[in-house]
Image (tube, helix red, strand yellow):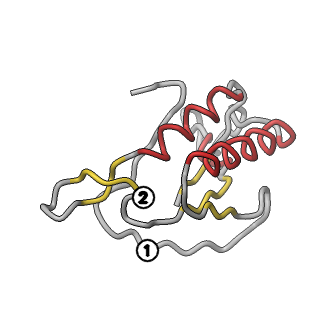
């Protein structure tokens, strides 16, 4: 599951870079127990959910600020660009939620990985 937050400073290159990075990320164990396989290698699928609250800042006060989140018209364009790029690179199923909708999403996290990937800090 990919929770995608789009920021005000994000652009098409960020969406493309993230899709390239995520489509080949090796986060699954091989037969020897080494983390060396991608989602495609293990016949996994991907689910992309828009999550603007990932852009929240709690630096000041007790109410999260969402000022750094992209406006909806920019965010939906970049969300769709990311999904399209991921779909073209990943040779398995890429599912999506409904952009901007209030959804109930269930996740069973199997394994040790929850990774934050920031296209502005390309580590």
The picture places residue 106, in percent across and down from the top left corner, at 55, 75
| 84 up-or-down from 121: above or below | below
The picture places residue 104, in percent across and down from the top left corner, at 66, 74
Instruction: Pick whichever, 68 or 122, lies toward us.
Output: 122
Residues at marks 1 and 2, CA–CA distance in whole angstroms: 16 Å
Q: Secondary structure at mark 1?
A: loop
Instruction: Pick whichever, 85 or 73, lies toward us.
Output: 85
**In the image: residue 36, left or right of residue 91:** left
Instruction: Pick whichever, 60 or 54, lies toward us.
Output: 54
Q: Quadrant of residue 25?
A: top left
| 114 up-or-down from 44: above or below | above
Give the residue at mark 1. Answer: 108
The picture places residue 30, in percent across and down from the top left corner, at 22, 60
For image coordinates 64% across by 51% down, the residue present is: 87
| 105 up-or-down from 46: above or below | below
The picture places residue 61, in percent across and down from the top left corner, at 59, 38
Q: Counting residues from the N terminus, which is met first, the one under dot 1 or under dot 2? A: 2
Q: Quadrant of residue 77?
A: top right
**In the image: residue 109, left or right of residue 86:** left
Q: Nearer the viewer, mark 1 or mark 2?
A: 2
Pointer 1 local density, CA inside 10 Å: few below 14, some 14–19, many at least 20: few
Give the residue at mark 2. Answer: 39
Which residue sits furthest left? 32
């Amino acid at each position: 599951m990919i929770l995608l937050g789009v920021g005000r400073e994000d652009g098409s290159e960020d969406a493309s870079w993230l899709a390239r990075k995520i489509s080949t990320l090796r986060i699954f164990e091989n037969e020897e127990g080494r983390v060396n396989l991608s989602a495609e290698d293990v016949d996994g699928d991907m689910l992309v959910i828009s999550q603007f609250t990932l852009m929240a800042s709690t630096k000041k006060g007790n109410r999260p600020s969402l000022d750094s989140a992209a406006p909806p018209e920019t965010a939906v364009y970049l969300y769709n660009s990311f999904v399209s790029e991921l779909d073209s690179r990943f040779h398995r199923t890429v599912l999506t939620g409904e952009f901007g909708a209030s959804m109930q999403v269930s996740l069973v996290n199997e394994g040790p990985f929850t990774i934050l990937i920031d296209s502005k800090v390309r580590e």
